[in-house]
Amino acid sequence: MKKKVPVVNVADVETANLAGLRLDATVALADLAGAVKEGLLGMCADVGLMVMAQMLDAEMTARVGPKHAKLPGRLANWHGSTDGPVVLGGRVLTVSRPRGRTVEGKEVELDTWAAFSSKDLLDRLTTERMLAGVATRRHGDVAEPLSAQVETAAKATGRSSVSRRFKRATEAALAELMARDLSGLDVAVIMIDGLDVAGSCVVVALVITTDGTKVPVGLWLGDTENKTVVTALLADLSARGLSADGGLLAVLDGAKALTAGIKKVFGERARIQRCTLHKRRNVKGYLPKELGSKTDWRLARAFADADPAKGYETATRIAGELKADHPDGAASLLEGLEEMFTVRRLGVSGRLAATLTNTNCIESMISVARTTMGNVKHWKDGSMKKRWVAAGMLEAQRNFRRVRGCKEMPTLVAALRRTTAGETVTADNYSQTAA
C-alpha cells in the first residue's frame, strides 16, 4: 500500500467558483519521488497538476453529484473524460479532465477548467518575454525548469507558436490603445512626438491628467511627421472624447507640423509650449564648440527664469549677440521663441515647470518602445510597426509615475481655465500679455 502524505486542505477555491466547497487533496509520496529529483519547481508542478485534477473532480461532483450515485431528479451525469490543454510555466500541457452532460445532452462547463485552460496568462508571459528581448527560438530555454515528464509532454514553445501568440497579444494591445474612451479623462497636457520605425514615422501621443497621471492615448503611422498625420491623430483623439474646453497645454518638440495640427484641431483653446531642450540643442549645433557651450548655459538660465518677461528679454539679447557672426544660429533661436515661456507665463514654477518645458515624459516612453523593438530585424508591414509601438507604449505605462511637481497641477489647471474663459492669448501677443 502506498503511503499517503497528510491531507492538504485547499480552502480557497474561488477560482472554480465553488462557494462553500472544502477541497481535500491527497498526494502519494511515491508519485512525487521522481518529481522531487527534478527540483522544487518540478515537484510543485506535479503536485499542482494532481491538485487541479482533484479540483475538477470536486467541482463536477458539486455540479452533478457523486459518480454512479442514484439521485432522484438528477439533472446531469458524469460522462467519462477527455483531453484538453492547460497553461503551465509558459507552456501548454495536455491533461485529462472529467466530462459531464445534462439530461438534455448539453456539456457541463467547469469554471475550474476555464481558469486553468485560459490562454491569457500565456499570452501575457509571451509578450513580456518578447518585449524584454527574448528571441522566439529561446522561449523554451528561459522557461521555468519543470520535471522531465512535463517537459516532454509540453508544447507551444516553438518559434511559430510564440510568434502567433505575440501577434495576437499585440493586436489586442493596439486595439485597446486606439479604442480608449478619453471622455472620462480630465486632461490638462498633451505631448506629441514621432519616432522612426524602418523608414516610417509613427506619431504618438501622451496626455497628462489634472492630477499628474500620464496616459498614452494613441498613435498614427505616416511617412513623415507632417501636418496631415498629426491632424488625423488629433482628430481621432477628439472623436474619442479628448476635450480642450477647459484649456489644454500642448508640449511639442518644435516641429511646425505639430503646432499646425494642434491649432487646426483645438484652435485657441490650446496653449503651445515648445521644448526648451530641443531649442538649446538646435542653437548649439550652429555654433563653435566653446561658444556653443557658453550660449547653451546662458539659454538654460534664461528659459528657467521665474520671470518669463525677463527670460524672454535675455534670450532675445543672446540672439542679437549671435546675429552678426552666426546669423543662422540667431534665427534658430528666435524661431518660436515666445512659445518657450508659455508654462512660465501661466504662472507655473518649480518642479512642474521643469517637467512641462520639455518633452522628456513622452521621449522616455518612446525610448522604452525603441528598446522593445531592438531585436526586430525584418518589418513586414505598417500594421506590424504599429503593433510593436503600441506594445512598447503600454509596456512603458506599467512603470509610469505621476509627473514631477504633480502637486502644482492645480495652478496650471486654474491658469488654463482662466485664459480659456477670459482674454484670448496667442503666440502673437504673448510678450504684450506678459508685459
Image (spheres, rainbow, N blue to C red):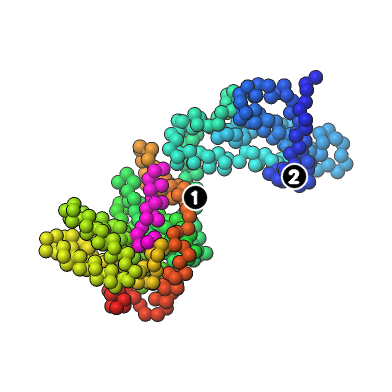
Q: Is residue 52 magenta?
A: no
Q: Quadrant of residue 114?
A: top right
Q: Residue at x 26, y 58 (%)?
A: 297
Give the quadrant of the N terminus. top right
Q: Is residue 367 magenta?
A: yes
Instruction: Check the picture and name the quadrant holding the C terminus.
Output: bottom left
Which class describes the residues within 10 Å of circle 2: few (<14), some (14-19), or many (20+)? Answer: some
Q: Which mark is residue 18?
A: 2
Q: Residue at x 88, y 41 (%)?
A: 72
> Which quadrant of the view contains residue 285?
bottom left
- Please name the residue shown 28% across and 65% down the image: 302
Q: Which residue is mark 1?
A: 398
Give the secondary structure at mark 1.
Answer: loop
Residue 226 visible in the current orientation:
no
Q: Residue furthest left?
A: 324
Instruction: Decide which of 330, 306 is in the foreground and name it.
Output: 306
Front-lying residue, 22 or 6: 6
Give percent across and percent down for residue 183. 50, 65
Q: Position of residue 80 (x, y in %)?
A: 74, 31
Q: Secondary structure at mark 2?
A: loop
Question: Toward the viewer: 103 or 366?
Answer: 366
- When the figure is inspected, residue 390 is found, relative to residue 116, above or below; the finding is below
Bounds of the magenta span? Answer: 354-372
Left or right placement of residue 299 versus residue 383 in this view: left
**Where is residue 213 drawn, in percent x and y?**
48, 59
* Residue 396 to residue 45: above or below: below
Q: Vertically, is 2 above or below 307?
A: above
